[in-house]
Image (cartoon, rainbow, N blue to C red):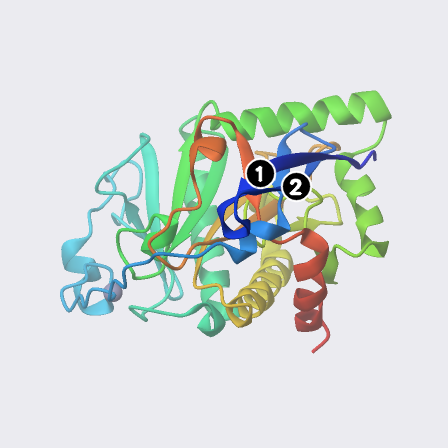
Amino acid sequence: MRLEKFSEFARILDPRKKFSEVSQEIEVRVDPLTGGVSRVNLARGLRPKQEIKVEAPIQPDCPFCPQNIDRETPKFPEDFVREGRIKRGRATIFPNLYPLADLHGVCVFTDAHKLELDKFSKEELMDGFKASVDFFRMGAEMGAIFHFLGWNHLPNAGASILHPHFQLIASKMGLRAERELFEACERYWRRNERSYWSDLEEERYSERYVGENDGIMWVAPWAPLGAYEVLGFSTQGVSSLTEFGEKGIEAFSEGIVRILRGLWNLGVRAVNMAVYSFPDRREWFSLHARIMARPSGSTTDRAFLEIYGSEVGLTAPPEAYAKILRSYFKV
Ligand SMILES: [Zn+2]
């Protein structure tokens, strides 16, 4: 695995220094699998923030709360889900009322209306994943073999409803990012005759290693796609959520809970998560999740560079926060 980086230097006439010239170093990292580019500038951490405080809206009429969910959330057609909604333990899946795809489910996995990142339980996440597997299996029966599980936690991460919920998209083609990812993994495997994911285990001996439990390893990626991003992947060659089984889902959920707790203590309040899962077992692909922090103020972290440049501007290098998150796998 080739970890490539180079530096760029920005020359600036700094108004805080009577417009004298200063130079700022930008470390540019290239993702060894996809060629994606991340840019780290430590100085950006010192930027002044102008934020307006927005109080979280109180939603006594939340459609996802237990007293309302059966009444106020939509159902699937009977020929897709006979009972209308999928229920597993605490989790309920119903169709998104404002879908972005033909099979776009919402998975509510806790009764709590608002949970901070340090309060999620392994059991709740497990129920959510198990119900999601049911949804994806049903989708696959209809020919929608690809599964995408996304999570927007809090409005700054794109959630319109505070009540925690996963978003599930089952599709025939896969989302663009999924397709590119699968292609990159297969290409890597053909070129190197090894899976990218088995090579990634080398990160166990790096400063970016976070921890592992029961076949799921967590690292801060070399070229993060967002702030405080972490990546958790199967070290047992599991490719699909649908082949994970009870123990795999438990280990995965346990890891996520630890990561969320660590991020919370780093001051993170909002996160996005995605689970990448191939429909069936492939030598070149391992199931994995990516979790990144989103801003807690009113300033967005997606600007021209991210939206139109398809590159990422960062403040903290992965080695710095991996060191802190690592302690959450030692207890
Ligand atoms: Zn609620």
Residue at coordinates 57% horizontally, 38% vertically from top-left? 12
Percent across and percent down for residue 263 are 55, 65
Is 307 or 258 nearer to us in this picture? 307
Q: Residue at x 49, y 30 (%)?
A: 145
Q: Where is the N terminus found, in terms of image quarters?
A: top right
- Of residues 189 and 230, the one drawn nearer to the viewer in this rendering: 230
| Left or right placement of residue 204 versus residue 256 in this view | right
Q: Amino acid at mark 2?
A: Ser
Left or right of residue 289: residue 109: left
State the residue position of label 2: 23
Asked if disc 1 and disc 2 are in contact, CB closer than 8 Å, the reply is: yes
Kindly identify the amino acid type of the residue bearing the numbered disc 1: Ile
Q: Residue at x 86, y 26 (%)?
A: 193
Question: Can you tell me whether the CB of the residue at mark 2 lies under 8 Å from the nearest atom of ligand 1?
Answer: no
Q: Which residue is mark 1?
A: 12
Query: Which residue is at the front of the view, 326 or 331?
Result: 326
Q: Quadrant of residue 320?
A: bottom right
Q: Is residue 189 left or right of residue 263?
A: right
Residue 114 placement (x, y as % from top left): 32, 69
